[in-house]
Image: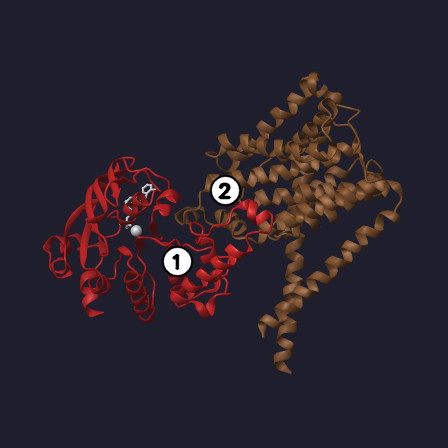
Amino acid sequence: MPILEVEGLSKYFGGLAALNDVNLSIQEGEIRGIIGPNGAGKTTLFNVISGVYRPSSGQIRYQGKTRIDGLSSSRIAGMGVVRTFQRTALYHHFSVLKNVIVARHLHAKENIFRVISGLAKKTEEKNTEKALEIVEFMGLGHLKEELAENLPHGHQRALGVAIAIACEPKVLLLDEPLTGMTPTEKDRMIDLIRKVHQQGITILMVEHDMRSVMELCGYISVLDFGMLLVEGPPAEIQNNEMVINAYLGTEDILSASTSA
Amino acid sequence: MSSHSMKKYKIGGLAPLILVLSGLCLVPFFLRAYLVEVAMMYFIYIILAQSYRLIVTVHDWQLYHIVLYGVGAYTSGMLAKNLGVPVFVAIPLGGAMAGLVGMAITLPLLRTKGWGFYIATYGLAELIRLTWLKFRNPFGGSTGIIDIPWPPVIAGIDFSDRIPYYFFSLGVMLLVMLMLYRIEKSRIGDSFKAISMDPELAASTGINIPRHRLMACSIGGFFAGVAGGLLVHRLGAVDPKLFNITTTLYLLIWVVVGGTNTFWGPIIGVSVMHTLFELSRPLIEIRPMFFGLSMVLVLIFLPGGLEGLISKAITRLQKRDRVAPVET
Ligand SMILES: Nc1ncnc2c1ncn2[C@@H]1O[C@H](COP(=O)(O)OP(=O)(O)O)[C@@H](O)[C@H]1O
Ligand SMILES: [Mg+2]
């Protein structure tokens, strides 16, 4: 059964169709790659799915029948569809641990009245414990007291994923998780994504690093000019004429990936 | 090792607190009557500034806080005078009313942002203040309401006397500080800050931003209303002038000069600026200019406020301390 279905999805910014009649069907438990040249609409797709933008038309169905298009970001996250950002989105002035504690919002049980009357200690401790677990799971344990703004880039990106994991998602949308990383950082992140996937989380991943996409994803959807160009397993996509043409004259990503 | 030095500073932080508290308990017995009255105003202003900071942590620098202080004062005063509600019941009810009004003002403005939001909050606040001014019945118009009941005698202590009321307002202030401190240290308090740091990220983790903004402004409003109740039952009277834009400016000055990054900023701001205010009574003509200027200077040269300056000094001391044992 598909866990997430996108049907006839369009998003216009003024006259520009950032998404144009896109259909996707994501199976529970898969790692889906979303690729395409810059400006193809990948981030917009994530923004629409995660409720940052309302779609201009089309439907997004989650777990069968539930329509999530048009719901607010926080509602959608609450239902288990959580995204990371292409930019390095963190609470820069919080420690690593606090970044994750705050992101436990959906699963921390305390309310404001219990906090005011000093009764929330127990639930807060439990929550901190769970946050600590996530921080260690993401390999950030030794940095837990460090301010997020002081982390090296690779660890900041890992913290971005940790924040999303803290929401206990069923579907995780990763927007260019490997951007700007050194090869070592990339390898570590790929391992982390695998580990997250092994927890039973369905993953949609936008990424330009083709080697990693081919390695991680069982199935790839290619966007170009807001339209779904082609879909298929990595081997097929790699040699697809249309895909190669789409990338032509933009970046030499496909060949770069084979040399890397 | 680092946890050791942290512990030391925690104890170091408690000692001055106990010292200040003992001082506050002794002080009314030695001060002139007038100065005890002034001290009570510090307590009221600290409640105002601290509750305002809670709202500021969500980044809503609204301009109706002083009017909510007024809503608390009018509500508590009128409940006690017109309906005979006991003063100590009327004060929290005034707080509740202020919290509700705060929520009612913010709700329609949730879609507005930045300047639009600030100006609209000011507009709605003025609307409330003008209602007090225009309607002699029941608000008493520009002369306000007089003969508001004093607090009662409880267990032989007459709370309408200066020193008992001093301790009552001190107690209320400490209680409010405790509650706001708990919020500050809680995950919910961090959610408020998270919203102001990166609203898009906060929403992506399921934090309902409108809900949190309403929560902050109604809790902050509640405490502002309580401060109003404390005021009105000491003055025995209330009028709209107490809650005009000048008072709002003073609130902004306390909070900006003190700083909003930590819990201690507003307390420092009120302590320093209200002391200057009292000391500059002889210069009453030029005082507003001086205060406006002080806020501008702080904004330019001390963006973190006095609190930022102090915490910088403390960090420097801590660093020196932490380095020392490693070297020996
Ligand atoms: N908020 C917005 N307002 C106007 N145009 C936008 C907005 N967001 C994205 N776009 C446009 O939509 C197109 C797709 O952008 P995006 O989804 O970011 O592409 P990708 O992530 O695939 O590089 C681009 O032309 C971009 O300029
Ligand atoms: Mg993008």
Determine contact: label 2, label 1, CB under 8 Å.
no
Q: Residue furthest toward the front?
A: B155
Quadrant where ligand 1 appears:
top left
The residue tagged 2 is B212
Q: Secondary structure at mark 2?
A: helix
Q: Nearer the viewer, residue A19 or B44?
A: B44
In this structure image, what is the colour of chain B? Answer: brown
Q: Nearer the viewer, residue A59 or B75?
A: B75
Q: Residue at x 27, y 55 (%)?
A: A202
Q: Position of residue A106 (x, y in %)?
A: 42, 49
The residue tagged 1 is A160
Q: Give the distance between the C-alpha atoms of the residues marked 2 and 1, in whole angstroms.
A: 22 Å
| Left or right, residue A78 beside residue B93 | left
The quarter of the picture where residue B253 lies is top right
Q: Secondary structure at mark 1?
A: helix
Q: Local crowd at mark 1 within 10 Å, few (<14), some, or many (≥20)?
A: many
Q: Nearer the viewer, mark 2 or mark 1?
A: 2
Q: Amino acid at mark 2?
A: His
Q: Position of residue B8 (x, y in %)?
A: 66, 69
Q: Chain of mark 2?
A: B
Q: Position of residue A231 (x, y in %)?
A: 15, 52
Q: Local crowd at mark 2 within 10 Å, few (<14), some, or many (≥20)?
A: some
| Left or right, residue A79 beside residue B141 | left
